Image (cartoon, grey):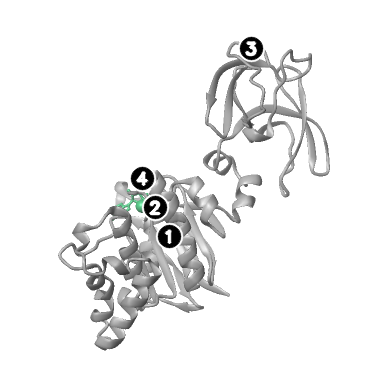
Amino acid sequence: KNAIEVRGVRKVFGTGENQVAALDTVSVSIRENEFFTLLGPSGCGKTTLLRLIAGFDFPSAGEILLHGQDIAPLPPFKRPVNTVFQSYALFPHMTVAQNIGFGLEMLGQPKAEIEARVAQMLKLVKMEALRARRTSQISGGQQQRVALARALAPQPKVLLLDEPLSALDYKLRKEMQIELKRLQHETGITFIFVTHDQEEALTMSDRIAVMSAGKILQVGAPRDIYDRPAERFVADFIGETNFLAGTVVSKKPGVATVKFASNATITAGYPEGFEPSGDVTLVVRPEHADMVPDPAKGTITGTLSNIVYFGTDTHYHVKLDGGENFIVRHQNSRSSPVTYETGAKV
Ligand code: ADP
Ligand code: MG
């Protein structure tokens, strides 16, 4: 079942020459109980889409359904949707507990119920010990937890999270990623999570929508997006990717043989619905590529220009004789031999 259906939504800001289509006819269905991520570079329309779902702004065209019902007539506070903002937007002069209970008080819930719910939320985000602290006196990571608890307290059906982890340092961000997954799992609430960080999207999401310039280019599970990118932009934005320009010389169902400038050929798979012919681009993930010293004739050759050590793996930057830059990634182990040096022909 779908929690949210976005149907042909457009959002245009400004008028005349200053018109910007922040969302250029977006359609997407988000399932109940799903950890769904909107991924894309800054300015692609992620926040705009969240704001339309939350009701802070209205679509120029199209409609948004919540559990099959058009939510256009509902003001934000009547939508069973809540938002966690990047800035947290906590009240600094209030305690942790008061912040979490604030929304419930606005809804006019009885005091005893609010107290019980706040206690439950404090436990959920592991902040019981700090319930009486002012939020101006807790760390960024703790503020993040309070913001989450406050947003979850009124039991929304859908939680919108707009780059909620971007203000945290690396280690804390990794911790909160796991914490967010746990919260989503425990509460069963549909999460719509926004990030521009592809690694975050891959590790956290059930499904990802990759956005660019107001459009959704591909929706799929992390593996689909990574292994079968539908477009060059998606392949480029998610992970590191090598692109090689070549010409199709022959093809069988599902595989094509491509010739490169050096006369080398590579036989590669191609996605369904694409009929390769003429000039094509070959997409090679760095971890799927390998290299050998003393290259044979008819292979793709180049010179090692840079070796970058990452602890878990090593990236070899190769300047191909055809002029392209190419990266080969080797996973390191304690027994991996160190056999290459920059300047080597591979
Ligand atoms: P993202 O969250 O992906 O960074 P946004 O949704 O904030 O992107 O913005 C998408 C586009 O819409 C950008 O070009 C931005 O400048 C424009 N935009 C967003 N909000 C407004 C607004 N209130 N007025 C004018 N332009 C806006
Ligand atoms: Mg944004």
* Callout 2 amino acid: Ala
Which quarter of the rendering shows the C terminus? top right
Q: Indicate if the residue with disc 2 has its beta carbon within 8 Å of ligand 1.
A: no
Q: Which residue, given by chain and number where applicable, does mark 4 sit on?
A: 169
* Callout 1 amino acid: Arg
Residue 95 shows up from this direction:
yes
State which tag comes first along the sequence, 4 or 2: 2
Label 1: how many residues lie within 10 Å, few (<14), some (14-19) or many (20+)?
Answer: many
State which tag comes first along the sequence, 2 or 1: 1
- Identify the residue shown where x is 18% and y is 68%: 94
Q: Which residue, given by chain and number where applicable, does mark 3 sit on?
A: 344
State which tag comes first along the sequence, 1 or 3: 1
State which tag comes first along the sequence, 3 or 2: 2
Distance, label 3 to label 2, CA atoms, is 49 Å
Q: Are marks 3 and 2 in contact (CB under 8 Å)?
A: no
Q: Which residue, given by chain and number where applicable, does mark 2 sit on?
A: 21
Distance, label 4 to label 2, CA atoms, is 33 Å
Comparing marks 4 and 2, which lies closer to the viewer? 4
Distance, label 1 to label 4, CA atoms, is 35 Å
Of residue 120 and residue 195, the one placed in the foreground of this image is 120
Label 3: how many residues lie within 10 Å, few (<14), some (14-19) or many (20+)?
Answer: few
Residue 200 drawn at (x, y percent): 48, 49
